[in-house]
Amino acid sequence: MTDLERQIEEGLAELHARWDGRIAATPARADERPQGEGARNRHGMPVEPPGQNVFEQAEWPVLDLGQTPKIAPARWKLTIDGAVARPRAFTWDQFQALPQVDDRQDFHCVTGWSILDLSFRGVRFETLAALARPAPEATHVMCHAADGYSTNLPLEEALKPDVLLVHANHGQPLAVEHGGPVRMVVPELWAWKGAKWITRLEFLAHDRRGYWEIRGYSNTAHPWRDDRKW
Ligand SMILES: Nc1nc2c(c(=O)[nH]1)N[C@H]1C(S)=C(S)[C@@H](COP(=O)(O)O)O[C@H]1N2
Ligand SMILES: [Mo]
Protein backbone atom coordinates (compact mmCIF):
# COMPACT_ATOMS: atom_id res chain seq x y z
CA MET A 1 0.00 0.00 0.00
CA THR A 2 1.38 3.42 -0.94
CA ASP A 3 1.53 6.31 1.48
CA LEU A 4 -1.27 8.02 -0.44
CA GLU A 5 -3.50 4.94 -0.24
CA ARG A 6 -2.86 4.70 3.49
CA GLN A 7 -3.76 8.37 4.01
CA ILE A 8 -6.99 7.90 2.04
CA GLU A 9 -7.91 4.79 4.00
CA GLU A 10 -7.31 6.50 7.35
CA GLY A 11 -9.19 9.62 6.31
CA LEU A 12 -12.16 7.60 5.01
CA ALA A 13 -12.36 5.59 8.24
CA GLU A 14 -12.58 8.84 10.21
CA LEU A 15 -15.19 10.32 7.84
CA HIS A 16 -17.36 7.20 7.81
CA ALA A 17 -17.34 7.00 11.62
CA ARG A 18 -18.40 10.62 11.82
CA TRP A 19 -20.85 10.93 8.90
CA ASP A 20 -22.45 7.60 7.94
CA GLY A 21 -25.41 8.09 10.30
CA ARG A 22 -26.17 11.52 8.91
CA ILE A 23 -25.73 10.31 5.30
CA ALA A 24 -28.27 7.53 5.95
CA ALA A 25 -30.75 10.10 7.33
CA THR A 26 -30.71 12.35 4.21
CA PRO A 27 -33.99 12.44 2.23
CA ALA A 28 -32.65 10.50 -0.77
CA ARG A 29 -31.57 7.65 1.54
CA ALA A 30 -34.21 7.77 4.28
CA ASP A 31 -37.38 8.61 2.34
CA GLU A 32 -39.54 5.72 1.22
CA ARG A 33 -39.31 7.19 -2.29
CA PRO A 34 -35.66 8.06 -2.75
CA GLN A 35 -33.65 8.76 -5.88
CA GLY A 36 -30.01 8.54 -6.71
CA GLU A 37 -27.39 7.17 -9.01
CA GLY A 38 -28.78 5.80 -12.23
CA ALA A 39 -30.83 2.66 -12.47
CA ARG A 40 -28.96 1.11 -9.60
CA ASN A 41 -30.67 3.09 -6.90
CA ARG A 42 -33.85 4.35 -8.41
CA HIS A 43 -35.42 1.74 -6.10
CA GLY A 44 -38.19 0.92 -8.54
CA MET A 45 -39.26 4.55 -8.75
CA PRO A 46 -40.44 6.07 -11.98
CA VAL A 47 -37.25 7.32 -13.55
CA GLU A 48 -37.82 11.03 -13.36
CA PRO A 49 -38.74 13.18 -10.37
CA PRO A 50 -42.13 14.97 -10.36
CA GLY A 51 -42.42 17.70 -12.97
CA GLN A 52 -39.37 16.61 -15.01
CA ASN A 53 -39.08 15.79 -18.74
CA VAL A 54 -36.46 13.24 -19.78
CA PHE A 55 -34.12 14.38 -22.56
CA GLU A 56 -31.84 12.20 -24.67
CA GLN A 57 -28.15 12.31 -23.75
CA ALA A 58 -27.36 13.88 -27.14
CA GLU A 59 -29.65 16.78 -26.15
CA TRP A 60 -27.86 17.46 -22.83
CA PRO A 61 -28.43 21.24 -22.46
CA VAL A 62 -25.73 23.67 -21.41
CA LEU A 63 -26.77 25.96 -18.55
CA ASP A 64 -24.44 28.40 -16.84
CA LEU A 65 -23.76 32.07 -16.23
CA GLY A 66 -22.57 32.55 -19.81
CA GLN A 67 -18.81 32.74 -19.40
CA THR A 68 -17.01 29.57 -20.40
CA PRO A 69 -13.55 29.50 -18.81
CA LYS A 70 -11.08 27.72 -21.09
CA ILE A 71 -8.72 25.96 -18.72
CA ALA A 72 -5.99 23.76 -20.16
CA PRO A 73 -5.54 20.69 -17.96
CA ALA A 74 -1.87 21.64 -17.44
CA ARG A 75 -3.02 24.92 -15.86
CA TRP A 76 -5.94 23.50 -13.87
CA LYS A 77 -5.48 23.26 -10.11
CA LEU A 78 -7.83 22.22 -7.31
CA THR A 79 -7.39 23.84 -3.90
CA ILE A 80 -8.91 22.35 -0.75
CA ASP A 81 -8.89 24.63 2.27
CA GLY A 82 -10.98 26.15 5.07
CA ALA A 83 -11.95 23.95 8.02
CA VAL A 84 -9.50 21.12 7.29
CA ALA A 85 -6.49 19.78 9.14
CA ARG A 86 -4.52 19.29 5.90
CA PRO A 87 -5.09 21.95 3.24
CA ARG A 88 -4.24 20.50 -0.17
CA ALA A 89 -3.68 21.48 -3.77
CA PHE A 90 -3.83 19.05 -6.69
CA THR A 91 -2.45 19.59 -10.17
CA TRP A 92 -4.02 17.74 -13.09
CA ASP A 93 -1.38 14.98 -12.89
CA GLN A 94 -1.81 14.61 -9.13
CA PHE A 95 -5.59 14.47 -9.56
CA GLN A 96 -5.29 11.78 -12.25
CA ALA A 97 -3.07 9.75 -9.90
CA LEU A 98 -5.86 9.55 -7.28
CA PRO A 99 -8.20 6.53 -7.24
CA GLN A 100 -10.61 6.88 -10.18
CA VAL A 101 -14.17 5.58 -10.31
CA ASP A 102 -16.65 5.02 -13.13
CA ASP A 103 -20.30 5.72 -12.40
CA ARG A 104 -23.54 5.84 -14.33
CA GLN A 105 -25.91 8.42 -12.95
CA ASP A 106 -28.88 10.69 -13.59
CA PHE A 107 -28.78 14.46 -13.89
CA HIS A 108 -31.83 16.48 -12.84
CA CYS A 109 -32.00 20.19 -13.69
CA VAL A 110 -34.39 22.33 -11.66
CA THR A 111 -35.60 24.00 -14.89
CA GLY A 112 -37.49 20.78 -15.70
CA TRP A 113 -35.28 18.35 -17.64
CA SER A 114 -33.51 15.17 -16.62
CA ILE A 115 -30.86 13.08 -18.38
CA LEU A 116 -30.63 9.43 -17.38
CA ASP A 117 -27.59 7.17 -17.21
CA LEU A 118 -24.74 9.53 -17.98
CA SER A 119 -21.40 7.72 -17.68
CA PHE A 120 -18.79 9.61 -15.74
CA ARG A 121 -15.21 8.97 -14.67
CA GLY A 122 -13.61 10.93 -11.88
CA VAL A 123 -12.54 11.11 -8.26
CA ARG A 124 -14.95 10.78 -5.37
CA PHE A 125 -15.39 13.93 -3.28
CA GLU A 126 -14.93 11.67 -0.23
CA THR A 127 -11.45 10.69 -1.45
CA LEU A 128 -10.42 14.35 -1.55
CA ALA A 129 -12.05 15.00 1.84
CA ALA A 130 -10.21 12.00 3.28
CA LEU A 131 -6.90 13.54 2.22
CA ALA A 132 -7.78 17.02 3.54
CA ARG A 133 -9.17 15.75 6.87
CA PRO A 134 -12.17 18.01 7.63
CA ALA A 135 -11.94 19.56 11.10
CA PRO A 136 -14.41 18.31 13.76
CA GLU A 137 -16.40 21.54 13.38
CA ALA A 138 -16.72 21.27 9.56
CA THR A 139 -20.38 20.94 8.51
CA HIS A 140 -20.53 22.22 4.91
CA VAL A 141 -18.43 22.75 1.82
CA MET A 142 -18.51 25.66 -0.63
CA CYS A 143 -17.62 24.64 -4.17
CA HIS A 144 -15.98 27.47 -6.12
CA ALA A 145 -15.68 27.62 -9.89
CA ALA A 146 -13.52 29.51 -12.38
CA ASP A 147 -16.48 31.55 -13.73
CA GLY A 148 -17.23 33.01 -10.29
CA TYR A 149 -20.01 30.48 -9.62
CA SER A 150 -20.32 28.85 -6.22
CA THR A 151 -22.64 26.34 -4.59
CA ASN A 152 -22.83 25.04 -1.02
CA LEU A 153 -23.40 21.48 0.19
CA PRO A 154 -23.92 19.98 3.64
CA LEU A 155 -21.23 17.35 4.19
CA GLU A 156 -23.86 14.58 4.61
CA GLU A 157 -24.72 15.17 0.94
CA ALA A 158 -21.20 15.90 -0.35
CA LEU A 159 -19.67 12.79 1.24
CA LYS A 160 -21.97 10.34 -0.58
CA PRO A 161 -19.96 7.97 -2.79
CA ASP A 162 -21.79 9.11 -5.95
CA VAL A 163 -20.58 12.71 -5.55
CA LEU A 164 -17.73 12.94 -8.04
CA LEU A 165 -15.25 15.40 -9.49
CA VAL A 166 -15.63 14.30 -13.10
CA HIS A 167 -13.15 14.68 -15.97
CA ALA A 168 -14.60 12.25 -18.53
CA ASN A 169 -18.02 11.44 -19.96
CA HIS A 170 -18.61 8.30 -22.04
CA GLY A 171 -14.86 7.76 -22.27
CA GLN A 172 -14.14 11.20 -23.68
CA PRO A 173 -12.63 14.20 -21.88
CA LEU A 174 -15.47 16.20 -20.33
CA ALA A 175 -16.53 18.90 -22.81
CA VAL A 176 -15.64 22.44 -21.80
CA GLU A 177 -19.30 23.56 -22.05
CA HIS A 178 -20.22 20.89 -19.49
CA GLY A 179 -17.47 22.01 -17.10
CA GLY A 180 -14.26 20.44 -18.37
CA PRO A 181 -11.54 19.86 -17.49
CA VAL A 182 -13.19 19.00 -14.12
CA ARG A 183 -16.69 19.52 -12.72
CA MET A 184 -18.62 18.17 -9.77
CA VAL A 185 -21.75 16.04 -10.03
CA VAL A 186 -24.17 15.53 -7.13
CA PRO A 187 -26.79 13.15 -8.56
CA GLU A 188 -29.06 12.97 -5.50
CA LEU A 189 -29.65 16.75 -5.61
CA TRP A 190 -30.59 19.26 -8.33
CA ALA A 191 -27.84 19.74 -10.89
CA TRP A 192 -26.99 23.31 -9.88
CA LYS A 193 -25.25 21.71 -6.87
CA GLY A 194 -22.55 20.43 -9.23
CA ALA A 195 -20.08 23.22 -10.03
CA LYS A 196 -18.57 23.17 -13.52
CA TRP A 197 -14.90 24.27 -13.90
CA ILE A 198 -14.31 23.47 -10.24
CA THR A 199 -11.24 25.11 -8.72
CA ARG A 200 -11.69 25.15 -4.95
CA LEU A 201 -13.41 23.20 -2.18
CA GLU A 202 -13.73 25.38 0.90
CA PHE A 203 -14.79 23.47 4.02
CA LEU A 204 -17.00 25.53 6.35
CA ALA A 205 -17.89 25.39 10.04
CA HIS A 206 -21.28 27.01 9.22
CA ASP A 207 -23.57 26.96 6.23
CA ARG A 208 -23.12 29.75 3.71
CA ARG A 209 -25.25 30.09 0.56
CA GLY A 210 -23.80 29.93 -2.93
CA TYR A 211 -24.69 31.77 -6.13
CA TRP A 212 -28.21 30.38 -6.76
CA GLU A 213 -28.97 29.69 -3.09
CA ILE A 214 -28.63 33.44 -2.40
CA ARG A 215 -30.94 34.14 -5.36
CA GLY A 216 -33.87 32.04 -4.21
CA TYR A 217 -33.14 28.43 -5.09
CA SER A 218 -33.82 25.88 -2.35
CA ASN A 219 -30.96 25.41 0.08
CA THR A 220 -31.80 21.69 0.34
CA ALA A 221 -32.52 20.93 -3.35
CA HIS A 222 -34.07 17.44 -3.21
CA PRO A 223 -35.52 16.52 -6.64
CA TRP A 224 -37.96 13.88 -5.38
CA ARG A 225 -39.48 16.35 -2.92
CA ASP A 226 -40.08 18.88 -5.72
CA ASP A 227 -37.89 21.14 -3.57
CA ARG A 228 -36.96 23.92 -6.00
CA LYS A 229 -37.27 27.34 -4.36
CA TRP A 230 -37.33 28.55 -0.80
N1 LIG B 1 -19.31 26.93 -12.73
C1 LIG B 1 -20.62 26.79 -12.92
N2 LIG B 1 -21.19 25.62 -12.59
C2 LIG B 1 -22.51 25.44 -12.76
C3 LIG B 1 -23.32 26.48 -13.27
C4 LIG B 1 -22.70 27.71 -13.60
O1 LIG B 1 -23.33 28.69 -14.03
N3 LIG B 1 -21.34 27.82 -13.41
N4 LIG B 1 -24.67 26.26 -13.44
C5 LIG B 1 -25.28 25.16 -12.68
C6 LIG B 1 -26.60 24.85 -13.16
S1 LIG B 1 -27.84 25.93 -12.75
C7 LIG B 1 -26.87 23.68 -13.82
S2 LIG B 1 -28.46 23.22 -14.20
C8 LIG B 1 -25.78 22.77 -14.25
C9 LIG B 1 -25.85 22.58 -15.75
O2 LIG B 1 -24.82 21.76 -16.22
P1 LIG B 1 -24.69 21.53 -17.78
O3 LIG B 1 -24.47 22.86 -18.43
O4 LIG B 1 -23.55 20.59 -17.94
O5 LIG B 1 -25.99 20.93 -18.23
O6 LIG B 1 -24.49 23.28 -13.92
C10 LIG B 1 -24.41 23.90 -12.67
N5 LIG B 1 -23.04 24.25 -12.42
MO1 LIG C 1 -29.84 25.06 -13.36
Image (spheres, rainbow, N blue to C red):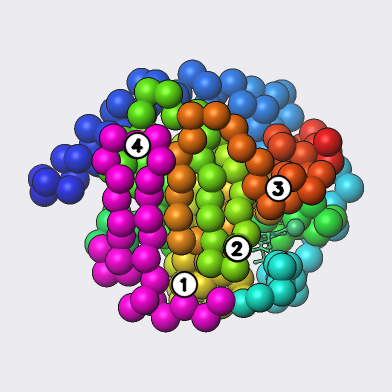
Q: Nearer the viewer, residue 49 or 131?
A: 131
Is 54 on the left-hand or right-hand side of 184?
Answer: right
Q: Compared to 34, does 131 lie above or below?
A: below
Q: Nearer the viewer, residue 96 or 86?
A: 86
Find out whether the residues at labels 1 and 3 contact each other: C-beta distance under 8 Å.
no
- Asked if the stretch drawn in magenta spans residue 120, the answer is no
Q: Quadrant of ligand 2?
A: bottom right
User: Disc 3 versus disc 2: distance between alpha carbons?
Assistant: 19 Å
Q: Which mark is residue 84?
A: 4
Mark closest to the chain's N terminus, 1 or 3: 1
Q: Compared to 213, does 83 lie above or below?
A: above
Give the residue drawn at x 37%, y 23%. 136
User: Disc 1 versus disc 3: distance between alpha carbons?
Assistant: 21 Å
| Quarter of the image where the N terminus is located | top left
Residue type (three-letter) at the residue carrying disc 2: Gly
**Which residue is the site of mark 1?**
181
Mark closest to the chain's N terminus, 3 or 2: 2
**Which residue is the site of mark 2?**
148
Ligand 1 within 8 Å, label 2 CB: yes
Residue type (three-letter) at the residue carrying disc 3: Trp
**Which residue ends up furthest to the right in the rendered image?**
51
User: Disc 1 versus disc 2: distance between alpha carbons?
Assistant: 16 Å
Ligand 2 within 8 Å, label 3 CB: yes
Give the residue drawn at x 17%, y 48%. 4
